Image (cartoon, rainbow, N blue to C red):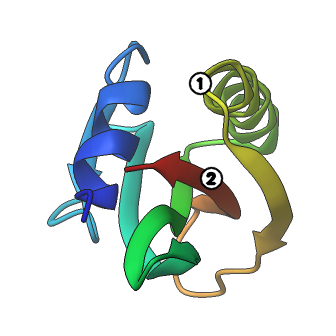
Amino acid sequence: MIDINKMAEMSLSRLECNVVYQYPEEFVTLPVVSYYNVAEKGGFYADNSECIQDGYVQIDVWSKNPAECGELSIKINEIMTEDGWTRELSMDIPRKDENIYHRTMRFQKYFQL
């Protein structure tokens, strides 16, 4: 079994902003990117052994304005796809309580064990 969070963290470490696990504790320093494992499962088995693991991560972008959010999302997509991830979803999440722009993205990858 592979730690999907560690794999996502390795990819996202190439960003030039704060990257945190699960949810930002504060929103003072923006932009910030958060990530977590949505699901993982066996993708292929042979002789009763898991040979391929299927992993899904969610990445959230938090920024001060929509342009910054969009630019960072494009950079994340480039990094993740270069590392073999496939983007399954990207969408803006409206926030009414603060002037923080939020986009969520989901990526999937097969890992050979």
Tell me which residue sits at (52%, 73%) in the image.
46
Mark 2 to mark 1 CA distance (whole Å): 9 Å
Indicate the secondary structure of the residue bearing disc 2: strand
Q: Position of residue 2 (x, y in %)?
A: 26, 57
Position of residue 81 relative to residue 59, above or below, is: above
Tell me which residue sits at (19%, 61%) in the image.
26
Query: Residue type at mark 1?
Result: Asp
For label 1, the residue is 83
Q: Are marks 2 and 1 in contact (CB under 8 Å)?
A: yes
Locate residue 54 relative to residue 25 in the image: left or right: right
Looking at this view, name the residue that lies furthest to the front.
47
Tell me which residue sits at (49%, 80%) in the image.
42
Locate residue 72 relative to residue 13 in the image: left or right: right
For label 2, the residue is 109
Tell me which residue sits at (79%, 44%) in the image.
66
Question: Depth check: 59 or 81 in front?
Answer: 81
Mark sitting on residue 5: none
Q: Position of residue 82 (x, y in %)?
A: 69, 18
Q: Position of residue 105 (x, y in %)?
A: 69, 60
**Dot 2, how many residues are within 10 Å of its Cα: few (below 14), some (14-19), or many (20+)?**
many
Quadrant in which residue 1 is drawn: bottom left
Indicate the secondary structure of the residue bearing disc 1: loop
Residue 27: tell me if it is visible: no
Query: Residue type at mark 2?
Result: Lys
